[in-house]
Image (tube, grey):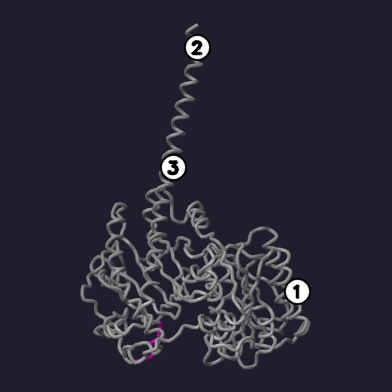
Amino acid sequence: MTYKLFPSLLLAASSLLTYSHCYLANAASADKENEVKSILQRMETDVLAFRDEMERVYSARCETKTLTECAETNFNDCSSTFPSQQCAKADELVFSACGDGETCNALWDKTLSTVSIPAALAQGPLDNPNDNEVIESACYSRLAEQYMIDKYKTDEEYWAKYNVQPSWTYFGAHNGLFRRIPAIHQEECGQYDPRRRPWFVAASSGPKDVVLVIDVSGSMEDYGRMDIAKEAAITIVETLTVADRVAVVSFSSRAAQIGGFNSLIRATNENKERLIKAIKNLDANEATNFYDAFNTAFNALDKTIRSESTSGCNIAILFMTDGQISEGPGANEVIKLVNDRTGQLSATFDRNATLFTFSLGQQADHAVTKSIACSTNGIWTPVDDFTGDLVTAMSSYYKLFALGLGEGGNEDFTAWVEPYEFTNPAGKMGTTVSAPVYDRSVKPPLFLGVVAVDSYMDALEQVLGEDATSSTMLQRFVLLSTARCPKLGLTECELDALRFLGGGEEATCGVCNSTYTGIVPEKCPFQSDLPNNLWHNTDSK
């Protein structure tokens, strides 16, 4: 009898042991996930607290003390010597231009922040900005410097338990100014523009579906327009994140979606690289068919929404052309098609599509592209061959969406960037969480810029035992990046003000005679108080 029971007991014991192992493994896995959740929640809390501080100091931007004490107190990321600069350790930062990180390395200063301004905005003496609003941004953001210093010290203590160094904390203003801690010199002076980075666009626009429509007709070869359009399209693609969906349509006599896709795709790093390669291979030839271009774009959107692979949020169609319709249906038919298809998206799927049209050069048909934008509550922008900046002009799409993230339940919106390889230290994987900054004293809230916090992936990899590039790690950031969609409720005057910001009076649709209060930032009343020189020193120039 005892012998017969033994196998049953052994089986029961084995089952119990297996159950115990599974239970312990699941419990350990749950503990790891909870710890990772705690790390990510801390980063979100940090970036929202930093946002609150930046919004607080903005309220003092026009005070005489803010402006007068700003003179010669900022450190330029290219020309200033830092008072407490020290060699960065190899595990903290490595600039290849400065050495291997062991025998020679870059200098940085953890006790202050540094300011970066794109070269096009720094045309004054000693590379000072020549735009008063940029000067104001430098001055009010300087008031947050002590907060940034204290935060970095706290970050060092927190990340030490994971044996990880804290990374950057920074603010990018809507006008291109960039302030960050620790202070460090840029490898290439005047090249960095925060408005062209994924963390900035993600936080200022939220999840979205983006369709780029690029004219590749023969005339695009004139004045280097093809290269300009490619650069702009590539920049837009690069700024998208895993929260977004994207498609690129090229058109001449006929239109086609490029990259081997027939609907919108998730903007992962891999998919973006594939699209960028396809954009670089575009050639200009043949005629100009607006109708087929828009029809192809709307077909891609329709298929994506029906297959439920959309972001579920705002839709932006960015249409760029240098020509006039020379093939296919004419202007009236094109305008009717666009109005019909946008109406169908709204009626069938409850989705609003906003059209952003860009006329490149003097020969472009301004009338049709402007009419398309005005009839659909969109934005038209003319871009001059010699003085225009298409990349900056195309930023109008995220400025519009930013207006929906400042209120209506989106006040604590944050955006995450898929893990990517940091430039510094080279080869190290990291991620960024960011949040939009507003002047909430006006309606709608005025978009000021974006604050962000970087973090190396080392801590998450240690806790989870996963590689930063794994599919499960990516899925975590996809879920983090899926937020409430910004709802746009602009009046016609507010929308016309945004058109005015992008293209001047010519770009407005004439629906409102207004000074555009609210959308357009008001100047500080005492412009004479603005400093002539921001920089503490230019000893490294």
Q: Secondary structure at mark 3?
A: helix
Looking at marks 3 and 2 on the same chain, the residue that comes earlier in the sequence is marked by 2
Residue 213 point in image, percent of width and height: 64, 76
Name the residue that disc number 1 marks: 340
> From mark 1 to mark 3, how far is it between C-alphas?
52 Å
Q: Which residues are magenta?
A: 118-124
Q: What label sits on residue 5 in the rendered view?
A: 2
Q: What label sits on residue 29 in the rendered view?
A: 3
> From mark 3 to mark 2, how far is it between C-alphas?
36 Å
Q: Quadrant of residue 289?
A: bottom right
Q: Secondary structure at mark 2?
A: helix
The answer to whether residue 299 is left or right of residue 408 is right
> From mark 2 to mark 1, how far is it between C-alphas?
78 Å
Kind of residue sitting beneath label 1: Asp
Q: For marks 2 and 1, give the one nearer the viewer.
A: 1
Q: Specify few, some or many for label 1: CA neighbours under 10 Å numbering under 14, 14-19, or 20 or more.
A: few
Kind of residue sitting beneath label 3: Ser
The answer to whether residue 418 is left or right of residue 364 is left
Q: Quadrant of residue 281?
A: bottom right
As rendered, which of 218 and 290 lies closer to the eye?
A: 290
The answer to whether residue 69 is left or right of residue 285 is left
